[in-house]
Image: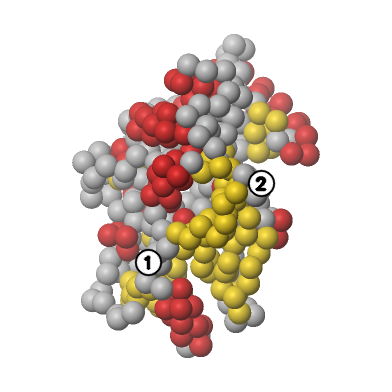
Amino acid sequence: MPQTDPVRLADLTTMRVGGPAQRYLEASTTDELVDAVREVDDADEPLLIVAGGSNLVVADEGVAGTVVRVATRGITVESADHCGGAMVRVAAGESWDGLVERAVAEGWSGIEALAGIPGATGSTPIQNVGAYGQEVAQTIASVRAWDRHEQAVRTLTNAECAFTYRHSRFKGSDRYVVLDVLFQLVLADLSAPVAYADLARQLGVELGDRVPLADARAAVIEQRRRRGMVLDPDDHDTWSCGSFFTNPIVSAPDFERMREAVHARCGADAEPPRFDAPDGQAKTSAAWLIDRAGFGKGFTTTGRAALSSKHTLAVTNRGGASAADVIDLARTVRDGVRDAFGVTLVNEPVLVGMTL
């Protein structure tokens, strides 16, 4: 785990912005990862954990303290039978999309709709990654993590992870460093029931139908590619963190107030999407609100950072953008939606050294 020459965080993130790391270490084994974190904590220095960098926006000034990059590898099948399914333990640094590709090839069903998502496997439980009707919370049996408070390795069950929409007990806290994730996947040649309308239409099936795993993965990747959500170094629409804002979840009265504001601005025929959420709440579409607030595809204030030309939910680096450019654009969009409809969008990526 040698210390390398100074590293720019822009080179480690899919948004491609961010200044230098004061100190940078790369951990290729779990022991190295734990030792690196303990060393930094013993010295009482700031610590930033980086894996795939797909959900991270780092300030132009860089990071004080130590950046530890998780480069651990390993996919271990602990058991596999049709009663308990495939119990698969995956190191935190493993490519997430690489895991999905292998799952499809092996006949492990349950994560095929999460194909094409960039980043590392250890990051997926932190924000409960989800897309096209699936969330990792549906297949995670447990998460093994280093507890920085207790200075011990802990295994947290699915229930202890406290998963909710794009959230978990790990998000917004620096207490835990994910070491590996144990998935419980179904042994099957067919996908989980298709739960996303656009995906069902593309596959030519009804919602709830199952399709061959490879067909489901291919259709998801095509859906994501259309939206600029599959990494491509030549496509600036993919120089992003994917969805920059989460879909708002509001109380029923707040949804009605928002709906009235939409009608006042856009006309009585404009109906904001509504989906049921826990405790009688309602979830709506951030992309829909952004577009109706006047921020269309390609919207920009500087030309260096812009909304994707394919999808209004992605803030993108058009080449040469700074972190300040990205945040200024995101703030403009957030404030515009709030002023138009009374809903404050919340950023999905982690912001380091900045606030929205």
Rendered image: mark on residue 83: 2
User: Going by the image, does 163 lie left or right of 330?
Assistant: right
Pick the front one: 225 or 352: 225
Side (left or right) of 14 relative to 246:
left
Q: Please say whether residue 56 is visible from this viewpoint.
A: no
Q: Which residue is mark 1?
A: 71
- Residue 309: give its label: none
Q: Residues within 10 Å of mark 2 (few under 14, many from 20)?
A: few
Sequence-first tag of 2 and 1: 1
What percent of the width, then of the height, locates residue 134?
A: 57, 38
Q: Quadrant of residue 262?
A: top right
Q: Are marks 2 and 1 in contact (CB under 8 Å)?
A: no
Which residue, as the protein is rendered here, is positioned at the far top? 269
Circle 1 packing at 10 Å, graded few (<14), some (14-19), many (20+), is: many
- Would residue 195 be found to the left or right of residue 296 on screen? right
Nearer mark to the viewer, of 2 and 1: 2
Q: Nearer the viewer, residue 293 or 214?
A: 214
Q: Position of residue 161 (x, y in %)?
A: 66, 58
Residue pictured at 57% horizontal, 46% vertical: 185
The one nearer the camera, 211 or 198, is 211
The answer to whether residue 248 is visible is yes
Q: Out of 42 and 297, give the one closest to the viewer.
A: 42
Q: Residue at (41%, 42%) from the top-left corner?
A: 105
Which residue is at 34% across, 56% downward? 13
The image quadrant that residue 254 belongs to is top right
Q: Residue furthest front?
A: 81
Query: What amino acid type should be assigned to the residue bearing mark 2?
Result: Cys
| Percent position of residue 6, x then y | 25, 74
Dividing the picture into quarters, in which one does residue 70 lie?
Answer: bottom left
Left or right: 268, with 331 as reference point: right
Q: Position of residue 305 (x, y in %)?
A: 31, 43
Amino acid type, mark 1: Ala
